[in-house]
Amino acid sequence: MKAIIPAAGLATRFLPATKAQPKAMLPVLNKPAIQYVVEEALAAEADEVVVVGNAQTQAIAAHFSPDEALVAQLEGRGKTNYADEVRRVGSLPVSFAEQPEPLGLGHAIHCAAAKVLGDAGDAEAEPFYVLLSDVLVPDNALLPRMLASSRAHGGASVIAVIRVPREQVNRFGVIAGEPVEGGIWRITGMVEKPSVEQAPSDLAIFGRYLLTPRVMELLSRVAPGAGGEIQLTDALIELLAYEEVYALIVDPDEGFDVGTVEDWLSTNLRLAERAAPSGAAG
Ligand code: G1P
């Protein structure tokens, strides 16, 4: 199974920190945000992660490439733990696809189509994950639950959703649907960036998707939507005409937002508290 991580965004909210480095490379404790997301996918049966980047995101490729000189230097200084970690990160199964123009999330995902569908073509291809690196799930427990839900429903697509205050719905894709069992809904509709009045529920799409290959075909012909961008949500709305799609409600304590400077900072603090031995300060 493959996973796609789109990483070609402009990251205006983090400027000037993101002038010369991609947002996904900003550290959360001692790891770049994207490394958490790559490891989350690999912990959930993904055998390859395709990062969709552009000319400005080459630091991501460098991070996931071998660096024998650094490994040798660290080993020469007896820092074997660091050498092992550098070697491990450089050997993770991460590959790259290019998004030449910033035409939207749906367009970014479609840029990885050839890698995800492979030679099998649409009909034979496996489902794939999409992970947005604006949110971290360091316990790595969400994708396995999505995979189990998909398998329980005949291999259907499953989208993670989270309850948000009504006044925030316009920042997200929002689903309509009906509950089918604990924490799982069958989706009947979706709206990207609705107004409070238009929003069909308070369940917002959260940035973790398990999708059937048909989504790639739908993405190739979806028209620009909200914000003039090619939206993944619009392809998923079309998917509803062919297949059942489910939503899995995320536990609010499970996700750690890094999409704004304030959230990135508080995620660093929350994860530092979790990492510190109890009672230890700093
Ligand atoms: C994207 C999706 C949206 C989803 C959101 C989650 O929007 O289009 O449906 O709710 O991610 O973070 P973006 O944040 O790229 O505007």
Image (cartoon, rainbow, N blue to C red):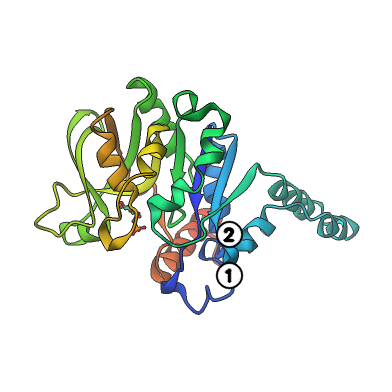
Q: Label 1 crowding class (10 Å Cα cut-off): few <14, some 14-19, many 20+?
A: some
Q: Is residue 267 above or below residue 204?
A: below
The residue shown at (58%, 70%) is 21
Q: First in sequence: mark 1 or mark 2?
A: 1
Which quarter of the picture shows residue 236? top left
Instruction: Answer left or right for 240 relative to 118.
Output: left
Determine which residue is flagged by label 2. Answer: 32
Cα–Cα gap, marks 1 and 2: 11 Å
Tag 1 secondary structure: loop
Q: Is residue 98 visible?
A: yes
Most extreme residue toward the left is: 197
Is the residue at mark 1 in contact range of ligand 1, meaning its CB lies under 8 Å from it?
Answer: no
Residue 245 image-quadrant placement: top left
Residue type, mark 2 in image: Pro
Q: Which residue is mark 1?
A: 21
Q: Which disc is residue 98 wearing? A: none
Give percent across and percent down for residue 130.
Answer: 44, 43
Q: Quarter containing ligand 1?
A: bottom left
Q: Nearer the viewer, residue 222 or 184?
A: 222
Q: Quadrant of the C terminus?
A: bottom right
